[in-house]
């Protein structure tokens, strides 16, 4: 037996992943255990969980891999600061203490975090980790590889080819020219938080028009036909400063960055639409060049930009590849899995056995809790609950509750690895409801009203409800497609007016028979559900389909704004009690909010939410 632990840490979204004899046993992000969003610390809780899942200790590990090379990253930082000196001294002064105290001594930090481990540490390059996480779990023997993010050591994007048990990266874009940092610069400029607000920018884009697209292409980025590019760094400040953009960019687009939490104007919507259009241009050109270089029929993607599901959907629909597979933990957390698989296949030379539909196991790789454990916890809270006798009774009951427009917290099986809830730690609702989108945003998620919700749909019926081929596989909510034309309705406002809406007023118009999951451009971020990866969720959707004639529901992550997705029954209970969620399902136990004796007051609820915002 060969046990390999992969670790990503010390930047953001630290995580651990365990691979035993080439099989992915467990993987989890540290934030889920510590409840600190994007936790960057050594993933001690995630490591402990992974080892417990396999019944191992640190002394049983054969190898430990780290997802990038700290010395090369430090080299890049020093070269960058020296290039801009003396400008950038404040940024240099802020960055150096953590490097001199911790990051330059990563082997020491790893040794401290893994007492009892006597083996060696292997450091893979950042984009090698991303590439390995994309190719090795994929169902393809041969595939083109694209990795796109902010920056690793020097690379910001890489192109390569995977065959059998080996990957080779052949092309790269190097820092400071970065598609991820370009997108993050506009995230900052439109008033959202870098490294977490990029989803919001993507969700805002359909409300605007890409009026600034050509301005971006003329001034900010020189894009070539092969997808390579260079950026005019005079418009940016991230190399030498503590912000993303410079005064020159602010002058170009007519004003300073939007203040966080202030009103969103048409300018922010148009900026979002413009940078999204440019991002899609870059992604498509890179994909076409990858096809030319590799002549493969398949493409795999990883890196933070690979979470841009609109761009992914365009590549699948209009690009040159027959199939696209995207690592569900595409960001830095997935690097932990990538480095472990890179060690097993590339460095140790072990055979790769393809698995169908893939080797990611639905990305349900986190901890699970039994019905007995859930019941014991609920008793400590004096909770009132009913226990269903079977899966079928559970699914029929929950389907009925959702049909009655209840919002349901769904806590089942192993937690997801990656930023998306995939039906294990989810909040579910009725996609047919006209009020559900605003109710879930404002009363459950406590987030911006413009943000869309994603649908889950039975895989065997995906082509009936979305503009996708029959049996299209999208299990990780990483592809956007249009809602099927047969479900479209003429846009009408709440007041019955047919007047074309602009900006955020578009939100008030009904566009399809599934209004809660139909974005203002008639698109949806689709997750297909099959019997193999998630049999219980498939059974629930089937029960809902039998009851309503609709195999589609809302699926959003089980958390509130600024909180990580729930991990334990305690996390789920707290989220249930502090929101206007109607029902909580823990395993086979069903709880209704109205039955609970110790409900929070509005003041207590707000106090908890304020604490999340501060954290």
Image: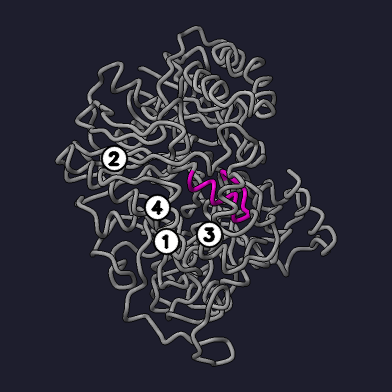
* Label 1, label 2: how far apart the Cα atoms are: 21 Å
Residue 585, horizontal then vertical, whole percent:
59, 59
Left or right placement of residue 590 versus residue 418 in this view: right
**Earlier residue among tags 3 and 2:** 2
Residue at the disc numbered 3 = 556
- In the rendered image, residue 204, in percent from the top left (x then y), is placed at 53, 63
The residue that disc 1 covers is 525
Can you tell which quarter of the image residue 87 is in?
top right
Residue lying at the far left of the rendered structure: 295
- Determine the CA span between mark 3 and mark 2: 25 Å
Q: Position of residue 372 (x, y in %)?
A: 60, 46
* Earlier sequence position, callout 4 versus callout 1: 4
Q: In which quadrant of the rendered image does the C terminus lie? A: top right
Q: Residue at x 50, y 59 (%)?
A: 272
Residues at badges 4 and 1 in contact (C-beta under 8 Å)?
A: no
Disc 4: which residue? 217
The range drawn in magenta is: 182-195
Closer to the camera, 508 or 404? Answer: 508
> Which label lies toward us, 4 or 2?
4
The 10 Å Cα crowd at callout 1, few under 14, some 14 to 19, many 20 or more, is many
Asked if the magenta segment contains residue 555, the reply would be no
- Which element is circle 3 on? strand
Asked if residue 152 can be seen in this view, the reply is yes
């Amino acid at each position: 037996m060969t046990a390999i632990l992969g670790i990503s840490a010390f930047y953001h979204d630290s995580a651990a992943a365990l691979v035993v004899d080439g099989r992915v046993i467990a993987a989890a992000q540290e934030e889920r255990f510590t409840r600190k969003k994007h936790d960057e610390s050594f993933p001690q809780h995630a490591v402990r969980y992974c080892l417990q899942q396999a019944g191992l200790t640190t002394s049983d590990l054969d190898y430990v891999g780290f997802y990038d090379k700290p010395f090369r990253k430090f080299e890049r930082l020093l070269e960058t600061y020296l290039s801009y000196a003396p400008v950038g001294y404040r940024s240099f002064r802020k960055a150096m203490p953590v490097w001199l105290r911790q990051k330059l001594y990563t082997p020491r930090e790893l040794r401290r975090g893994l007492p009892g481990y006597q083996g060696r540490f292997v450091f893979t390059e950042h984009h090698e980790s991303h590439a390995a996480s994309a190719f090795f779990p994929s169902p393809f023997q041969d595939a083109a590889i694209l990795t796109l993010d902010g920056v690793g050591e020097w690379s910001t994007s890489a192109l390569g080819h995977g065959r059998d048990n080996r990957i080779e990266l052949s092309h790269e874009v190097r820092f400071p020219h970065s598609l991820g940092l370009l997108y993050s610069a506009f995230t900052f400029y439109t008033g959202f938080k870098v490294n977490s607000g990029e989803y919001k920018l993507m969700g805002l884009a359909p409300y605007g028009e890409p009026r600034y697209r050509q301005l971006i292409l003329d001034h900010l980025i020189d894009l070539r036909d092969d997808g390579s590019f260079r950026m005019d760094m005079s418009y940016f400040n991230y190399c030498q400063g503590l912000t993303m953009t410079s005064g020159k960019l602010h002058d170009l687009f007519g004003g300073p960055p939007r203040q966080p939490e202030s009103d969103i104007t048409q300018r922010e919507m148009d900026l979002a639409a413009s940078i999204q259009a440019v991002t899609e241009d870059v992604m498509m050109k890179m994909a076409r060049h990858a096809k030319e270089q590799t002549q493969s029929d398949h493409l795999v993607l990883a890196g933070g930009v690979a979470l841009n599901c609109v761009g992914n959907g365009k590549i699948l629909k209009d690009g040159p590849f027959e199939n696209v597979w995207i690592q569900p933990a595409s960001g830095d957390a997935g690097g932990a899995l990538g480095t472990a698989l890179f060690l097993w296949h590339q460095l140790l030379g072990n055979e790769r056995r393809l698995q169908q539909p893939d080797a990611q196991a639905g990305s349900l790789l986190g901890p699970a809790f039994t019905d007995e454990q859930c019941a014991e916890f609920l008793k400590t809270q004096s909770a009132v609950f009913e226990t269903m006798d079977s899966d079928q009774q559970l699914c029929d009951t929950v389907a009925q509750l959702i049909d009655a427009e209840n919002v349901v917290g769904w806590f089942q099986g192993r937690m997801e690895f990656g930023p998306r809830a995939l039906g294990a730690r989810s909040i579910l609702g009725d996609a047919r409801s006209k009020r559900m989108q605003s109710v879930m945003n404002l009363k459950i998620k406590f987030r911006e009203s413009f943000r869309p919700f994603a649908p889950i749909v039975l895989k065997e019926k995906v082509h009936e409800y979305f503009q996708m081929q029959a049996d299209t596989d999208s299990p990780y909510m990483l592809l956007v497609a249009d809602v099927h034309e047969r479900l479209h309705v003429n846009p009408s406002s709440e007041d019955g007016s047919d007047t074309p809406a602009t900006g955020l007023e578009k939100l008030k118009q009904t566009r399809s028979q599934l209004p809660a999951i139909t974005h203002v451009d008639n698109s949806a971020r689709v997750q297909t559900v099959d019997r193999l990866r998630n049999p219980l969720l498939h059974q629930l959707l089937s029960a809902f389909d039998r009851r309503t004639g609709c195999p589609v529901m809302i699926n959003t992550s089980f958390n509130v704004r600024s909180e990580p997705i729930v991990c334990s029954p305690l996390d789920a209970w707290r989220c249930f009690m502090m929101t206007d969620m109607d029902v909580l399902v823990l395993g086979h136990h069903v709880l209704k909010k109205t039955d609970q004796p110790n409900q929070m007051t509005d003041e207590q609820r707000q106090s908890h939410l304020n604490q999340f915002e501060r954290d």
